[in-house]
C-alpha cells in the first residue's frame, strides 16, 4: 500500500461500518478528492490513479460502498451483491461527505466512477452534497462512443439526463417517494404526469443532445 496512506473504518448513523481510505498530502495540498467507485469495486482497484492525483498535490479519500468491498454485506450470501434501495447509499455519501468537507482542505472535489457516478449525480440533484466541483465517469458510454467513432460528449449528456428524469413512478426517484404518501398521491398520478414528461424529455434529448 502507498506510503503515508491508511485504511480505517467509520461508523455511520445506524452503526454500520464503512471501510475508508485516506492519503493526505504532507504540507500544503492543492485540494481534496473524495472518490466513489463502481458496483462491486474495492478501494484497491484505484490505487494507481490515486497515486497520480496524490503526486499532483491532492489529498485522497475513498470508502467502499455499504454491502461491497470491506464494508460488509447486505445479503445473507456474502458472494451476492444486493441493495433494496439506492437511498441508503445516497445517505451514506451525504453523511460521509459532510464530515469530509469539514476536516479536509478545499477545494473539495467529489468523483464518481460508473455506479459511483450515478450516486454522486443523484446526491447532487437531490441537494444532499455540495462540493466545489464534481467529476462523473461513465466508462460504458465513453467506450461505446469510441467503438463507433463518435464524440463521447453527447453520450455523457444522455447518461446525465437519464439519471435525472425518473418521473413516471413514485419509486423512480427519492423525492418522488418522499412526497408519495405525504401528498396523498396514487401510483396513477405519477403515470399521468410522469409519462408525458418522459416523452417530452425524450423528444428534446433526441433533437438536441446530438448537436452538442
Image (cartoon, rainbow, N blue to C red):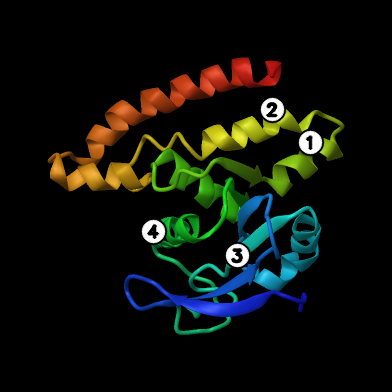
Determine the CA span between mark 1 and mark 2: 9 Å
Determine the CA span between mark 1 and mark 4: 32 Å
- In the rendered view, does 56 fall on the left or right side of 111? right
CA neighbours of label 3 inside 10 A, class few (<14), some (14 to 19), many (20+): many
Q: Earlier in the sequence, mark 1 or mark 3?
A: 3
Q: Where residue 140 sits in the image (x, y, percent)?
A: 72, 47
**What secondary structure is marked by label 3?**
strand
The residue identified by callout 1 is 145
The residue identified by callout 3 is 62
CB contact under 8 Å: marks 4 and 3: no
CB contact under 8 Å: marks 1 and 4: no
User: Would you identify the image quadrant in which residue 192 lies?
Assistant: top left
CA neighbours of label 1 inside 10 A, class few (<14), some (14 to 19), many (20+): some
The residue identified by callout 2 is 154
Looking at this rendering, what residue extends furthest in the front direction?
27
Q: Where residue 183 sits in the image (x, y, percent)?
A: 14, 39
**What secondary structure is marked by label 2?**
helix
Amino acid at each position: 500500500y502507498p506510503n503515508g496512506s491508511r485504511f480505517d473504518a467509520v461508523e455511520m448513523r445506524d452503526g454500520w461500518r464503512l471501510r475508508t481510505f485516506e492519503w493526505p498530502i504532507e504540507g500544503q495540498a492543492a485540494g481534496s478528492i473524495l472518490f466513489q467507485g463502481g458496483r462491486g469495486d474495492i478501494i484497491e482497484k484505484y490505487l494507481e490513479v490515486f497515486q497520480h492525483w496524490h503526486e499532483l498535490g491532492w489529498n485522497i479519500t475513498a470508502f467502499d460502498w455499504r454491502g461491497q468491498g470491506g464494508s460488509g454485506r447486505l445479503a445473507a450470501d456474502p458472494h451476492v451483491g444486493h441493495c433494496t434501495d439506492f437511498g441508503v447509499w445516497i445517505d451514506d455519501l451525504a453523511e460521509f461527505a459532510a464530515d469530509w468537507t469539514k476536516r479536509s482542505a478545499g477545494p473539495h472535489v467529489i468523483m464518481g466512477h460508473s455506479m459511483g457516478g450515478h450516486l454522486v449525480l443523484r446526491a447532487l440533484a437531490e441537494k444532499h452534497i455540495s462540493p466545489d466541483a464534481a467529476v462523473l465517469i461513465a466508462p460504458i458510454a465513453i467506450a461505446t462512443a469510441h467503438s463507433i467513432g463518435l464524440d463521447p460528449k453527447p453520450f455523457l449528456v444522455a447518461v446525465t439526463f437519464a439519471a435525472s428524469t425518473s418521473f413516471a413512478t413514485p419509486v423512480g426517484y427519492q423525492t418522488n417517494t418522499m412526497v408519495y404518501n405525504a401528498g396523498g398521491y396514487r401510483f396513477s398520478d405519477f403515470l399521468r404526469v410522469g409519462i408525458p414528461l418522459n416523452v417530452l424529455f425524450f423528444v428534446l434529448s433526441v433533437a438536441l443532445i446530438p448537436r452538442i
